[in-house]
Image (tube, coloured by chain):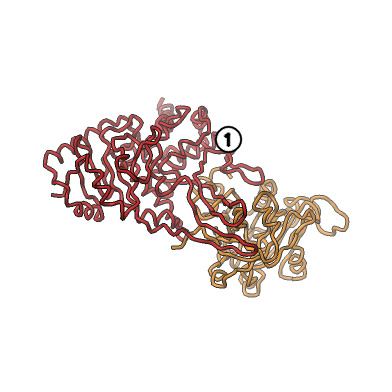
Amino acid sequence: MEQKILKKDEIGKLYKEFESEYNFYAPISQKGNIVFEKIENPEDIVLDYLNSKIPPKSVLFPQMEVLFEYTLDEKDVEITDRQDLDQKILIFGIRPCDAYSFELMANFFSFHGNWEDEIYLKKKENTTLIGIGCNNPRTTCFCTSVGGNPFNKENMDVFLTDLGETYLVEGISEKGKEIVNKLSWLSDAADKDVKKSQELATQAEESIVTKMDTDKIVSNLETSFEHPVWEEISESCIGCGSCAYLCPTCTCFDVIDETDQYNNRGRRIRIWDTCQSCLYTLETSGHNPRNTKIQRCRNRIMHKFSYYPTNYDLLGCVGCGRCISVCPANNDLRTILDKIEKIEKEEDEKIVA
Amino acid sequence: MPNPYIPYLTRVKSIVGENKANDIKTIELEFKKEEEYKKFDYIPGQFAEISMIGKGECPIGIASSPTEEGTIKFTIKRMGTVTSAFHGSEVGDIIGVRGPCGNGWPVEDMKGKNIVVIGGGFAFSTLRSLVLYLLDEKHRKDYGDITVIYGNRDPGEVLYTDVLDEWKKRDDIKVVLTIDREAEGWTEEVGFVAPIVKKVGPKSDNGVAVVCGPPIMIKTTIAVMEELNWGPEQILNSLEARMKCGIGKCGRCNIGNKFICTDGPVFSLAELKELPDEY
């Protein structure tokens, strides 16, 4: 039998199987927010969450990450490369949208021939994903409009379905199948379990009400750079950047040197940055190519729904809805995209009229 | 696949003030490891991310030509923390270098063409690199006429007076220098770059023009070039932007779907006309 059953009280046992070989990350509740952290105690793991506040991109692309370390003396510098990139990482309880975001990030970080982001790609290569389907997508979820699905198993190694008292366990990739085989203590799933998981998948998919025509949005954006809609879209934005920081596909970063007070040693780090900040593009001369909020809001949307598709033939959005739920100004990406989707329609109607 | 954020280490071999205001210096760097110098295989118009380790890193155009073997040079204006640190550096200090980055001037495609190099002010560094490359005995025969038009605010701001003097002595390059207003002892042209270009009147036939300088100079010069029948695919620009990584990862130097760091910094005017006006 390919499918297995994991009892809910066996998560600790599962954790023990992996803890020595892997850095084991899973969702936990931190001050009421769900975040992916390295697990010390498996009882902290929370699997019945709807969506984590901070996306698990933080595991492979942390908010602050060392690029290299250095020691300085009078007339010399010594550089030490990262030594921890070969460690194996396991992310347990990841959702399908977030698992797909790793593929988009890896695509971006590997794109420019000679200049691959080895730090990200090596970690990605050493990462195993044991994910879980979304029985109850949030009202802000729209993965089905951007090519995803609440039960998309494609980017997982092992896939779990919450059946109430138990989890259905399926090995998806070769690596995942091996893992499941090794967990010999798992019981076999019955036909009714498999059937129930299929029903849950169908229900979940049907529960997502947002439907958008992303082909139309992508094609409308190609001709809408100067459209007045951007003024409308950006009006309520306060420029806080939460949408980008918490976006599982946003990759932008700043680089700074942190040196100790004695000027002896330090580290060059990268930290999440956002195109929603006016400092992001401010040049030393004082010139700023994206000086206005309109330009900055436009860049975020264009990047995900026009530039990314143009460069890679993929959408730069996984439909997780975080940017919608965290926006303090209620600027809803679905509304924004709806406005863009309608641009040409309105003009076509005018032509018909 | 090495960590692309780790710089090669170089030492400052010389540091020279370039202008009267003394806020522009050229730093010459020697690689600590010969094999890393060999890996740093560049063409004119490329840039590098250079750093005072512990202070920070910034993108700077390479001012030396690959034909000047043994060292590389950067001309740096003192602006912020990192550039001030470069200005305060001394011979023997360590400077980190990552690169070469960007596409550079299309020296292969420029073969057989008449080259017009137009520069304004401090933006002359990668043009210095280009002209030295074109004039090198290995390359000079591959190119047609070479004309350099270089403008500055006043005589004290003219960079690279040593190489300019050498070029002026040669008969296979025409060098036109201009300053904005008349100054004592100045015997060359007076006026902004655009009207001087008009006066020199470079012919567009089989030509490639390379234009670098402050935005207003570029704008006015391009208007003149168009009057002189230069097509947008014949005019090349090098763009700048705030950058952190220089290798297409940190995100901030995009113009539309292009990154200045990896798709540029050199774009033809024809290419720029296809991109959103956001640079």
Instruction: Kindly indicate the quadrant of the structure image that contains residue B74.
Output: bottom right
Q: In the image, is residue B123 above or below residue A349?
A: below
- How crowded pointer 1 is (Cα within 10 Å; few <14, some 14-19, many 20+) is rated as some
Left or right: A196 in relation to B104: left
Determine the chain carrying the residue at label 1.
A
Instruction: Kindly indicate the quadrant of the structure image that contains residue B116.
Output: bottom right
Left or right: A343 in relation to A23: right
Left or right: B153 in relation to A14: right
- B27 or A233, which is in the foreground? B27
Residue depicted at 13% across the width and 49% down the height: A1
Residue depicted at 30% across the width and 29% down the height: A209
Q: Position of residue A287 (x, y in %)?
A: 64, 43
Residue type pointed to by label 1? Thr
**Given the current orientation, which residue lies at the most extreme left position?**
A191
Residue indicated by mark 1: A292
Q: In the image, is residue B14 above or below residue A184?
A: below
**Given the current orientation, which residue lies at the most extreme right position?**
B184
Residue depicted at 71% across the width and 53% down the height: B120
Q: How many marks?
A: 1
Q: In the image, is residue B38 above or below residue A180?
A: below
Q: Position of residue A208 (x, y in %)?
A: 29, 31
Left or right: B150 in relation to A177: right
State the red chain.
A
**Given the current orientation, which residue lies at the most extreme bottom position?**
B137
State the orange chain.
B
- Quarter of the picture containing the C terminus of chain A is top left
